[in-house]
Each structure stands twice: as structure tokens, then as C-alpha cells.
């Protein structure tokens, strides 16, 4: 491992067979493409999986992955605070794909469209809210404060390396999807442990 808390994409590729890989993105993002063999346990449901993850970690190393590495780093810290060793994959699923490695993409039901990655959803929502604030500001000057607030939120997001808008968007039904059932994932992990 790069250090005791991170794992590079190359290290993940080389050690994938010995690692239990947990994808902490939303079920919608996971369904859009994930590292082969990854189990989906969304970041906001990590506490529900703590006992099972403890068993899995006793069996072998845990690696956590998200889109870019930010949420998996948060998840890694959370698990470490609970006494469970886990490493975050630097660059996340995007880094995995950018390195030329394949992603598993479950077949979509007929007529369904793939979900957008969270980063793209954040850009759409933030841009739309800025335009809404500016447009409404023509009739109601105070509405421009919406645009200012979104701009300030984006700056804070960059400085703190977190994103409140992504946390809100992750709770939408679009991102929860039918795959939000955690029990089968935990059963699989417990059985393997």
C-alpha cells in the first residue's frame, strides 16, 4: 500500500484477489459502472455494515473505493475510528477506468438510461441554481444571493474537499435506485468471512 490508509489503482489491480473491495458510492452511481468484484455499501449506510465489515477485515484487507477517492477516504477514516483497518483507493473508480481497466456495468432494464456520475449531477445542479438566481435576480434583486450562495458553497467544497450538494443529491430516489437493499450485500460478505 502507498501508506497504511491509501492504495493506488496499480496496487488495487495487483492485489485485487486478496482484498475485499467496498464501493461507498450511491447505488445509482455503482450501477453506472464499478470496479469488478466491488460490493456496494453506500457511505451513508456504513454504520449498518460495521459488524460485517469487521468480520471481513479480520479475513483480509479492506479497500474502499468511490468515484474519485474523497468519499472512500472519509469511509476509511470512519472505519478506522471504529477499529476496522481499511484503505482508500486513490483516484477511485474514475482512476481505475482512466488507467484502462474495465468496469462492471449491470444490464439496464429496457428503456432505462444509465445514471449520471455524482460529479456531473453536482455540476448540473450548481449551474442550474446559479442561472436561476441570476434570472430571478432581474425581477427580484435579492434572488442573486442564491447564485452567490452556490458560488460560496463551491469554493468551500474545493477548500474542504467535501461537497454538501453531492450529499443532498445522493439522497434523491434517482440515486438510491432499487439496488439500495443492503441485506444481500452484507449476507454475501458475512458468508465469505
Image (tube, grey):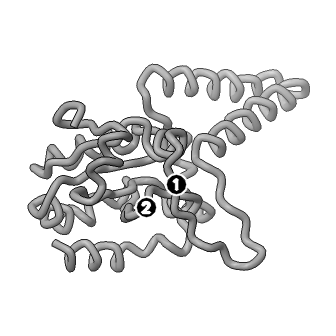
Q: Which residue is mark 2?
A: 36
Q: Which residue is mark 1?
A: 102
Q: Residue at x 43, y 47 (%)?
A: 66
Which disc, if any, is residue 87?
none
Q: Position of residue 171 (x, y in %)?
A: 52, 57
Q: Position of residue 147 (x, y in %)?
A: 71, 26
Q: Position of residue 191 (x, y in %)?
A: 21, 79
Q: Residue at x 38, y 40 (%)?
A: 9
Asked if residue 30 lies left or right of residue 50, the reply is right
Q: Position of residue 42 (x, y in %)?
A: 40, 58
Q: Name the foreground residue: 186 vs 91.
A: 91
Mark 2 and mark 1 lie on one chain; the one further toward the N terminus is 2
Instruction: Please say if 168 is above or below 53.
Output: above
Q: Is residue 174 in sight in this rendering?
A: yes
Q: Residues within 10 Å of mark 2 (few under 14, many from 20)?
A: few
Residue 134: name its quadrant.
top right
Q: Is residue 167 in sight in this rendering?
A: no
Circles 2 and 1: CB distance less than 8 Å?
yes
Asked if residue 176 lies left or right of residue 143, the reply is left
- Quadrant location of the N terminus? top left
Q: Name the foreground residue: 55 vs 77.
A: 55
Q: Residue at x 42, y 75 (%)?
A: 181
Asked if residue 146 lies left or right of residue 24, the reply is right
User: Residues under labels 2 and 1: Cα distance?
Assistant: 8 Å
Instruction: Please say if 110 is above or below 24.
Output: below
Q: Secondary structure at mark 1?
A: loop
Q: Name the foreground residue: 67 vs 168.
A: 67
- Quadrant location of the C terminus? bottom left
Amino acid at each position: 500500500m502507498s501508506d497504511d490508509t491509501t492504495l493506488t489503482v496499480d496496487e488495487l489491480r495487483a492485489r485485487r484477489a486478496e482484498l475485499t473491495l467496498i464501493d461507498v458510492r450511491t447505488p445509482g452511481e455503482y450501477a453506472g459502472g464499478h470496479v469488478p468484484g466491488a460490493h456496494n455499501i453506500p457511505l451513508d449506510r456504513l454504520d449498518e455494515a460495521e459488524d460485517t465489515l469487521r468480520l471481513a477485515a479480520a479475513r483480509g484487507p479492506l479497500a474502499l473505493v468511490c468515484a474519485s477517492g474523497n468519499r472512500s477516504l472519509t469511509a476509511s477514516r470512519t472505519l478506522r475510528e471504529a477499529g476496522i483497518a481499511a484503505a482508500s483507493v486513490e483516484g477511485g473508480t474514475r482512476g481505475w477506468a482512466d488507467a484502462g481497466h474495465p468496469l462492471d456495468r449491470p444490464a439496464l432494464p429496457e428503456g432505462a438510461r444509465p445514471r449520471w456520475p455524482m460529479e456531473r449531477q453536482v455540476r448540473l445542479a450548481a449551474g442550474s441554481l446559479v442561472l436561476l438566481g441570476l434570472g430571478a435576480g432581474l425581477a427580484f434583486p435579492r434572488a442573486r444571493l442564491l447564485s452567490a450562495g452556490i458560488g460560496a458553497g463551491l469554493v468551500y467544497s474545493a477548500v474542504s474537499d467535501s461537497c454538501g450538494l453531492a450529499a443532498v443529491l445522493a439522497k434523491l430516489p434517482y440515486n438510491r435506485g432499487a439496488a439500495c437493499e443492503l441485506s444481500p450485500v452484507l449476507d454475501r460478505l458475512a458468508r465469505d468471512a
